[in-house]
Image (cartoon, helix red, strand yellow):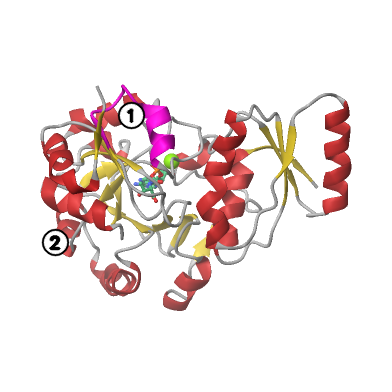
Amino acid sequence: MTRIISPKQVRDAAEIIRKGGVVAFPTETVYGLGASALNPDAAKKIFKAKGRPSDNPLIVHIAGREQLKKVARIPKNKLAIVNKLIRKFWPGPLTLILPRKEIVPLEVTGGLGTVAVRMPKSRIALRLIRMAGVPIAAPSANISGKPSGTCFEHVYDDFNGKIDGIIKSRPCKIGVESTVLDLTSNVPFILRPGGVTYEQLRKVLPGIKIYTHKRKVKVVKSPGMKYKHYSPKAKVLLFEDGEMRRIAEYKKRLERKGKRVVVISPKNSVAFSRKLFAMFRECDKKKIEYILMPAIEEKGIGLAIMNRIRKAASRILR
Ligand code: TXA
Ligand code: MG
């Protein structure tokens, strides 16, 4: 049975996590599917519930600086950078990849010698971590491959009956996941654009690099990059030139064939990122077969939005 837990009952959720159970909880980005980050059996339950490949590591969520030292090693030459980033962006949607400490089981890190760490901003999430007394390992709360859960209903649809509890709160504020920043290579690398923008990071780290769809990735640094993601059942067609007339013609052609089609025009704003995954799930409910989307400029939060759309897309029309 999956217990629906109110924000007032966070203590109960913490108790479940302490005992090795799995509880979904809200963060400012998306809902997370949480379990103790120090318990390998609990971590395995997360992978099972999500249907996630075991080599795709989880983010370890912490509530304070002292927990960072517990789970990650900060190389001396990175200390200044880490301090700067934390001061500026934590708590918030920035995940740092650092060398892992042994206390974090390999089940959590997908066998890697590094660990992903983030201090979320959501007060419920922070309270949950503090009350549990352990860092919490959590991927986004969605069945593997589906759009991330950004509302209680999404999480309930995917996991009712499969996990111990869900904290029922309001929809997540940002709606796309955290920015994943690798600090283990010589140059800091953004592995996944997200809630903290490239422009914001560049101010703090002028030399920062980013993997983009244009760059051929030789080594897959972030295991999550090689899997299909965020996909509704409908086919997402991305129109690279953003030409609305072309999209309207394409829509007509599909409708003549009897297809159920919608056009979703992304906006470069948090108001849009907040709704993106919910719109994908809404299309599934309405049995939409095609979602046509024009590309937008990959600046600010638009970079994360376009990253998710590209990964969800079954075709990109140039
Ligand atoms: O906003 C978020 O980040 C949400 C909330 C719940 O915090 N979490 C989230 O987790 O999006 P998930 O598991 O869906 O995505 C984590 C990404 C994956 O692409 C994974 O491969 C990558 O981070 N990752 C985790 N640990 C890593 C590591 N040690 N090295 C490289 N990439 C890592
Ligand atoms: Mg995910």
Disc 1 crowd rating (10 Å Cα; few below 14, some 14-19, many 20+) is many
Amino acid carrying label 2: it is Glu
Q: At 30% from the left edge and 66% from the top edge, which residue is drawn?
A: 90
Query: Residue placed at 18% from the left, 64% from the top?
Result: 65
Rendering coords of residue 119 (x, y %): 28, 58
Tell which circle, 2 or 1, labels the residue nearer the N-terminal end. Answer: 1
**Which residue matches tag 1?**
47
Task: For ligand 1, tell me if the residue under mark 1 lies within 8 Å.
Answer: no
Q: Nearer the viewer, residue 168 or 190?
A: 168
Amino acid type, residue under disc 1 in the picture: Phe
Disc 2 crowd rating (10 Å Cα; few below 14, some 14-19, many 20+) is few
Q: Is residue 32 above or below residue 188?
A: above
Residue 285 point in image, percent of width and height: 58, 29
**For this view, does 313 lie left or right of residue 25?**
right
Q: Quick check: can you spot residue 52? A: no
**Residue 121 in the image: above or below residue 150:** below
Q: In the image, 150: left or right of 100?
A: right
Q: Which residues are magenta?
A: 152-166
Q: CA distance from mark 2 to mark 1?
A: 27 Å
Residue occupying image coordinates x 50% and y 45%: 219
- The question of residue 91 being in magenta is answered with no
Residue 181 appears in the figure: yes
Q: Which residue is mark 2?
A: 66
Q: Secondary structure at mark 1?
A: helix
Which residue is more in the foreground, 27 or 228? 27
| 100 or 245: nearer the viewer | 245
Q: Nearer the viewer, residue 61 or 184?
A: 61
The quarter of the rendered structure image containing the N terminus is top left
